[in-house]
Image (cartoon, rainbow, N blue to C red):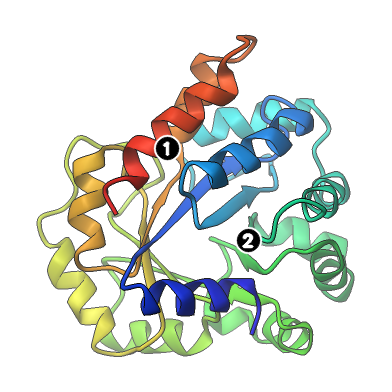
Amino acid sequence: MNRIDKKFKELKKKRKKAFAAFIMAGDPSLAITKKLIFELEKNGADIIELGVPFSDPLADGPTIQRSSERAIKRKATINSVSNLVRNVRLQTQIPIAFLTYYNLIHHYGLEKFVQKAKSCGVDGVIIPDLPPEESQELRRIAKKKNLSIIHLAAPTSSRERLKKIADASTGFIYYVSLTGTTGARRELPKELSASLRAIKRVTRKPVCVGFGISRPDQVKSISKIADGVIVGSAIIKVIEKNIGKKDLIKKVGSFVRRLTCML
C-alpha cells in the first residue's frame, strides 16, 4: 500500500474527502514549488499533483499551458523535478503524483522513469494522453514498484470503457468533469452527479473529480458525491498573478484554505 492508498483509507475512516492540489513544478521556480508543496499541505491538501512540464500539453487549457512554458524556461525536467521530490521527502510524507504526458516518459524510458519516480518518493503518475489499452507495459513495470497509474475517465466514456478505465487504474480514478481542456469554469455540467453515479456503479476504487473546479461551493457540491476534488488551474492563476511578489506562497495557501475548509 503506497501513500495514496493509505491516504484514501485514512480519509474513509474519518468519513472525509480528499483534496488534491495541482501545481506545475518549476513555475515560477523549483525553489518556490518546494515551498508551495509545504504550504498546500499546511492548508489542507491531501494529495499533491506535481506537473512535469511538457511543450504540448494537449489536455490543458491556456492557464496550465502558460505555467508549463514558464517551467520549461526554468529548465524543469523529470530529473530536476525528481530531485525536488527527494528533497521534499525529508520533511513530508504527503502523497505525491506526477502529472505529465506519455511522450516524455517514453523518451525517458519506462523502466528508468518508474525507478526514478519511486526512488525519489513519488507515489503515482497521471498521464492524460495514455489510454488504458496502451498502458499495459507501464502498468506492469509500475506494479512491481507499487507506483500507482491513475487513468482519466470522461463524460463521454461508455459504461464498458468506464469499467476498463476503472480496472486499469490504481490509486484512484481521475474523473474529468467536462469535455474540453483544463481551466476554471463558472458552472459545472448539470449531469455531473449522474455521471459520477455511473462510474461508482462499476468500481469501488476512489473517484476524484477535476477540470473546471475553482470555487468553494463547487468543492462542497462535488465532495458530496465523489471521493475527492482536484483543483489545478485556479491555483495556477493565483501563482501567476503573484509571481515576483513576496507573499505569493501565503496567497496560494490562503486560496487553498478557502477551498479545503468546504470538505
| Image-based side of 129 in relation to 157, left or right | right
The residue at 69%/44% (across/down) is: 54
Q: Farthest residue to the left: give it.
A: 190
- Residue 78 pos. (x, y %): 82, 51
| Image-based side of 15 in relation to 181, left or right | left
SS assignment at label 2: strand
The residue at 40%/30% (across/down) is: 255
> Residue type at mark 2?
Ala
**In this rendering, does residue 150 appear at all?**
no
Residue 118 lies, with reference to residue 94, above or below; the image says below
Q: Is 104 or 255 nearer to us in this picture?
A: 255
The residue at 30%/90% (across/down) is: 202
Viewer-nearest of labels 2 and 1? Answer: 1
- Residue 243 pos. (x, y %): 60, 15
| Image-based side of 131 in relation to 263, left or right | right
- Residue 14 pos. (x, y %): 36, 73
Residue 135 lies, with reference to residue 21, above or below; the image says below
Q: Which residue is mark 2?
A: 97
> Residue type at mark 1?
Val
Which image quadrant: the N terminus? bottom right
Query: What label sits on residue 256 in the rendered view?
Result: 1
For marks 2 and 1, the one nearer the N-term is: 2
**Alpha carbon distance from label 2 to label 1:** 18 Å
* Quadrant of res 119: bottom right
* Quadrant of res 261: top left
